[in-house]
Image (cartoon, rainbow, N blue to C red):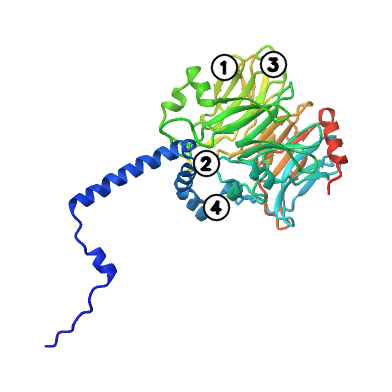
Amino acid sequence: MRLERLPPPGLWERFLSRHVPMWGVMLLVLAGTVVTILFGALVRDPSWSGRAGAVAVDLAAVPQTLSRLVRGDRFSSRFYDGDHAPIPGGFWRNRAQPFIDPGYLLFTAYDEAAGRPEVRILRLSDGSIVHRYRPDIAAINARSTFRSALIDLQRDRNVHRNLMMHPLLMADGGLVIHDSSPLARVDACGRLKWMIDGIFHHSVERAPDGSLWAVYRYPVSPLPDVNPAFDDEALAHVSADGQPLGLTRIADILDRNGFSYLWRGRPYTDDPFHLNDVQPVPGDGPYWKKGDLFLSLRNMSLVMLYRPSTGRILWHHFGPWAMQHDVSVIDDHRIALFDNHWRFAAPEGEVDGTNRLPVYDFRTGAVTYPFARATERTRIRTRAQGRATPMANGDMFVEDTERGRVMRLTPGGEVRWMFIAADPAGRRYELRWSRYLDPNTDGPAIQAAENARCA
């Protein structure tokens, strides 16, 4: 029998076969523990450590980044991939009715030729586009310095992916914009006028005094013992010329009003509040005073009336709405909501039938559904997002965000007009909280935008 001589082990084999003394193992475990504790401290508060903190936050975000690469980031996708009729986009008016809307539609659309989103003003009397905005997103992002596991501006909100949620028309014809990104004001030609760094999302509204109220999310939560992706939200008060006037955390509002159990007493989640609308009241009334705010906390199905001057919650109501978006004041005793009407038992939640447009009456405490026939006929089924704005004549301006539809509905169930955002193949673009522009109040701003001469 002949024995073959085996070749000597290689360097890697010799390294893996080395005997390691127990003291060496214990030293490695101790060093690993120290590094883990230090890494956790850097992620929880990266501000004290400069570049090291920023690197720690980036490393902590690796699992989230990989998940986005595999599954995609639905909030940066321009198309809705759910059920919808593949019909061409465009503006349609109900010619069976004599009504002609004198208003305008302000909305974000995706320009396939330019490869980027833009904001447009559409005249509702004839469906023509009277102005287009292409804000300088690169200039906005270049001024930002925050680091967060929640968002990376260069990756997630660059010029191709910033969808400019809920644009607000200003008196000079310019806009205030954001999209889980800094709050910025641009002129009618898209040139940057001012920017406030941070993560602003969902609604931005103008108060009667001309100041702005917006929804803010801390890039890194000051709360102890939360994940890097914890959504720590606040009310941001800003002047029209971009001066910060105040920042109030939702957690603090709930805690000092005896509602801490709503988030501290529940199983941990990274998104306990989901503040999606801050609506200033138009003036004094029997149930509120000028300066008060209606707040919508989606993940609690909670709507509340809050007085910033005293820090007190004056009124609150849980449901019958479920995961609602958008609260609007109708008159001095009624509010309207966009109720997403979730079925919670379904995986990831889903709409239970259709969305609803409840009206709450402060005089009686009753909740009614005057647009039930309209929502059933139009089959509005936005799972997340959605807008509903009461019109002066009793109609309702509604955005079915996910299906790319905006429409004006009558209480009788008629559709006065509809705009559908879709490409030539009928694929629906997701909208980003459109606005109805009333020529009685927004006329000079609309005219300023139309008259702008941009290169």
User: In this view, which residue lies farthest toward the left?
Assistant: 1
| Drawn side of residue 325 relative to residue 390, left or right | left
**Amino acid type at image mark 1:** Gly
Structural distance between the alpha carbons of marks 3 and 4: 43 Å
**Pointer 3 local density, CA inside 10 Å: few below 14, some 14–19, many at least 20:** some
Q: Are marks 2 and 1 in contact (CB under 8 Å)?
A: no
Give the residue pinned by disc 4: 72
| Drawn side of residue 297 relative to residue 396, left or right | left
Structural distance between the alpha carbons of marks 2 and 1: 29 Å
Give the residue pinned by disc 3: 290
Using the image as rendered, state which of residue 88 and residue 145 is in the foreground: 145
Q: Position of residue 117 (x, y in %)?
A: 70, 49
**Pointer 1 local density, CA inside 10 Å: few below 14, some 14–19, many at least 20:** some
Q: Nearer the viewer, mark 2 or mark 1?
A: 2
- Looking at marks 3 and 4 on the same chain, the residue that comes earlier in the sequence is marked by 4
**Amino acid type at image mark 4:** Gly
Q: Residue at x 68, y 11 (%)?
A: 286
Q: Secondary structure at mark 3?
A: loop
- Looking at marks 3 and 1 on the same chain, the residue that comes earlier in the sequence is marked by 3
**Pointer 2 local density, CA inside 10 Å: few below 14, some 14–19, many at least 20:** many
- Looking at marks 3 and 2 on the same chain, the residue that comes earlier in the sequence is marked by 2
Q: Secondary structure at mark 2?
A: loop
Give the residue pinned by disc 1: 311
Q: Secondary structure at mark 1?
A: loop
The relative height of residue 265 versus residue 188 in the rendered view (above or below) is: above
Structural distance between the alpha carbons of marks 2 and 4: 19 Å
Q: Position of residue 401 (x, y in %)?
A: 65, 42
Name which quarter of the figure residue 367 lies in.
Answer: top right
- Looking at marks 2 and 1 on the same chain, the residue that comes earlier in the sequence is marked by 2
